[in-house]
Amino acid sequence: MTQELKLQRVTPEELPKVLEQLNSEQQIIELAIFGPDLLITTAPEDWPPPLQTHSVFQLTANLLELPHELLKLKQLKSLILFSADLWDRDAKAIAENLTQLTFLNLGRNNVGNTGARSIAENLEQLTSLYLGFNQIGNDGARSISQKLCSLTLLELSRNQVGDAGAQAIAEHLGQLTLLNLDLNEIGDVGARAIAEHLGKLNNLSLAAKGFTEKRVSDAGAQSIAEHLGELTSLNLDLHEIGDVGVRAIAEHLPKLKLLKLRGNKIEDNGVKAIAKHLSQLTSLDLSLNQKITNIDSLAKLPLHLLNVSKTGVISLLPLKSSILSGVQVKWSDTLGQGAGIYVGNCPLIRPPVEIIKQGPEAVLNYFREIEAQGTDRLFEAKLLIVGEGGAGKTSLLRRMFHPKMDLPAEEETTKGIDIYRHDFPIEGDRTFRLNAWDFGGQQIYHATHQFFLTKRSLYVLVDDTRTDAKSIHDEGLKFWLEVVETLSERSPLLIFQNEKGGRSKKIDEPGIKGRFANVKDVYRGNLEHFGSADVLRKAVELFALQLPHIGEDVPAKWIVIRDELEELAQARPYISLDDYFAVYSKHLEFDGEKALHLSHYYHDLGVFLHFQSPPELRRTVFLQNKWVTDAVFRILDDEEVKANRGRFTVSDCDRLWADKGYASKDVELRALMERFELAYRLPDMPKETWLVPQHLSPSKPPELGEWAKTGDLVLTFRYEFLPRGLVSRHMVRMHRFVKQPDLCWSHGALFEHGETQVLVETGTRGIEIALRSRGPDQKSLLSVIASDLDALNSSFRGLNDKVSKLVPCICKTCKSLKEPATFEQKELIDRKNRGKLTIECPKPPEYYDVSVIELLEGISFESLPEWAREPKAADEGFAIAVSFPGEHRPFVLEIVEHLAKEFGRERVFYDEWHEALLLGSGGDLKLQECYKQAKLVIPFFSEHYTKPWCTMEWETIRGILLTRHKDDAVIPVHLDDTEIQGWPAVNFGIKLKGRSANEIASLILDSYRRRA
Ligand SMILES: Nc1nc2c(ncn2[C@@H]2O[C@H](COP(=O)(O)OP(=O)(O)O)[C@@H](O)[C@H]2O)c(=O)[nH]1
Ligand SMILES: [Mg+2]
């Protein structure tokens, strides 16, 4: 059989015929059929070895019944029927008819205890049995144990087997070499039984469920260690094993190659024990053991996979040599992504988190640079002063940093943002640079907080003692505490009580600190007096020095480059990208990619502003934050713009940006406003016009008065805290569906696609956003709009915990109501996880029981239709980019012509079609950008691909591959058998095999669609 035929897709109707044919044509002995839920995505050559010898079918839909043609395949020795909706009677039929089977896999079905018993009673010669995810309990496990004494492999993961079942297995199945009981209900008793009886095991998997009381402790781990000396692979995820248990495992199980201990109670000593004894370990999972902080000792193990995500690890320096030799560091926690060091959510300072988030290439660069230059630290931070207008923020700043200055006069309220610089000396003759940001009080500024209230900063909240706010229940104080907590990712916050006129006020300090862990201390003083803020200033300096990024070691030259940019910033509000590159090249050998890694890092830290997209912004590095914010606020504050309900044109910009060099950067400044989601350009206007949705009317248009109807699809987001301006930002992001801006207001918007409409509206209490969808595509449009709101919520790092989705009831009573009962999505998911599959509707008279699954499915987002995706404007980037050696130009041209029929030439990057993009200086960088933006990159590998020019392209593509590994962004076409250096999987890709250009093009299209 050729490779192409190995995987056949069949409909349930076709299956009987296919089986019949198999029966007549060949003496088939190995057969695999997969249900429609489990798509096989890898190529046959990458399948696990057992599958390689099977005939493999993929069903396009679920089987309605087991075809009896299958039962005629009496000679079958191996059968896989995975996720095919089989029940106990199907298992019985298989067991009674296919009596030659030695290998059986019925994973992810519903065979239950009865099905397990039928298998046990009829298939005594089985050596391998896989019945994961099948509702099997102790009874099923017992039947299997009593009859199937030849089993060497038994997989019963995701069932309900308890200690009793594990004991039965242990007592009867002494031949087992592999036992997988992941996600059952097994504790120490079961673990001990397994340990004492199954001495031949070399692979044991006992990961616990997330929701369970049953866990293995140190005692269980010790028995396993003492008895199962043959183990090479052990999984004890999510138990309660501490350092004692780990030490036993390390000391007694020297053959271990794979060890999984995710989510236990392991600390640094446990890690040391592993390092000391398990010298053959290649794969180790210690994630979710929060007390681990130090993994230095692991450097000597031959690990190619290490997961320490969600631990307290702060430094990867000890693993430097493996990182330099090519092991990738990934800011994630998901395994199954191949080799690497996984460090998602660790408080890393070496390298800094911002570097790791940029991808493995940036990490590699970091280590190379510190090898060459040594390290230094950046002593620079932001201090943000927040609080109600008039509370005394500006006064406090003056008292702290300009003691000689008078307090501001009543009418002198802050406009926009003022930035004070405070330098203070620190150890080693160095200076700490603190930039203190003072916000004006106007509401419109609140919507911009999200961009400036950055993490890794220090906050001071000024509390005005003239108001009565004393505890977290008082709205004024609570609002600011919530703002800082939501936006700043737990940055430290100091409260200053301004005792104006000597008035003091008690404040519920323990209550506030109990609820807001980031509140460090409360200070007070009467700002009329000189020296009243001295204590606070000392505290500010102290806390600034303790900010996490201050401890970060970065390559020494990075600090030198920052210092030079700071000097430039004194005279110039911005510089061009080329100027920045020039500064970089003065200190380090020039490499565009690396220079961009560095600017990205400083941008993330809030040191300066440099967006790497869109192209208008990429070319400018904004050194003075205040210059930028002043320009933006001139538009936001302008009375004419307000009077025009937020609309402004180029002539408004000319009027407002006449001085300070703004005029020559107007395009960039408008792009920045779009990037900040403050404004968008209205389409189809005679004169170029932008809209600031914040300034739309505050009241809902009367046309939309009584909008709700029965039959609407409704989804509600409920917030414990709703950041200001969220709906306006949502409107900017989704403006392609805004057809009538006049039907939008500052707290709501109407989105439309054809005949379908979604009304998004903030509830009167200001804590809910309701989405109502109606029309032929109501589910799709609702999905699009709701997913964007989800994404927006996630962009506030502290918001996800404060928002819940309310799912409307679908019972008969509610279906006839405009306002159906609602359930919290979180509660529904929890019920589903705990196996409680109904919930009672609170509406009389019937109080129906409603299916939890159906409720959840009602709001599950389907894959979206093409119209719902982001538009395909030319600046949206390329769908496909090709890279090829000139020798193959004619052939490649033929292929891209085919692709262009599908996407249009503007979305296929083929050098000759896009020459204009590459003209001028920095052509190589631009080229890299094209490859980066492309959804899919196709290199054509051949002996000619090793030429220098291609090699340079290849370096870029490989970078993309490494960072975009997960979404299959690179698929090569192998024109011959040349191995390309750095390409990890030689087998992966499209092989020429005499195919025509047309055929290759359709394979590429297939891959593209599968990715999308
Ligand atoms: N008498 C007195 N006036 C104060 C005190 N603190 C602030 N002010 C005045 O209150 C007004 C508002 O203060 P300001 O610092 O501008 O508040 P901001 O809007 O929070 O920046 C100004 O006129 C200040 O001079 C104080 O402790 N005593
Ligand atoms: Mg002020």
Image (cartoon, rainbow, N blue to C red):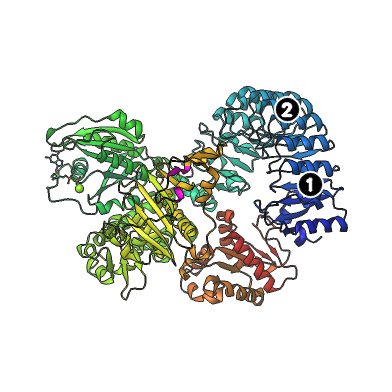
598 or 900: which is nearer to us? 900
344 or 827: which is nearer to us? 827
Of all residues, the one furthest to the front in this rendering is 845
Q: Can residue 595 be seen in this view?
A: no
Quarter holding residue 154: top right
Disc 2 target residue = 228
Based on the picture, tell me whether residue 510 belongs to the magenta stretch.
no
**Number of marks:** 2
Residue count near mark 1 (Cα–Cα under 10 Å), binned few <14, some 14–19, many ≥20 = many
SS class, disc 1? strand
404 or 496: which is nearer to us? 496
Residue in view at x 56 percent, y 57 percent: 959
The amino acid on which the numbered mark 1 sits, given as a three-letter code, is: Leu
SS class, disc 2? loop
The relative height of residue 364 versus residue 280 in the rendered view (above or below) is below
Q: What stretch is highlighted in magenta?
A: 814-825
- For marks 1 and 2, the one nearer the N-term is 1
Q: Quadrant of the N terminus?
A: bottom right
Quarter holding residue 938: bottom right
Based on the picture, tell me whether residue 818 belongs to the magenta stretch.
yes
Q: Distance from label 1 to label 2 (Cα)?
A: 31 Å
Q: Quadrant of the C terminus?
A: bottom right
Q: Position of residue 524 (x, y in %)?
A: 21, 33
Quarter holding residue 249: top right
The amino acid on which the numbered mark 2 sits, given as a three-letter code, is: Leu
Q: Does the residue labelled 1 lie within 8 Å of ligand 1?
A: no
Residue in view at x 22 percent, y 52 percent: 442
Disc 1 target residue = 79
Residue in view at x 53 percent, y 39 percent: 838
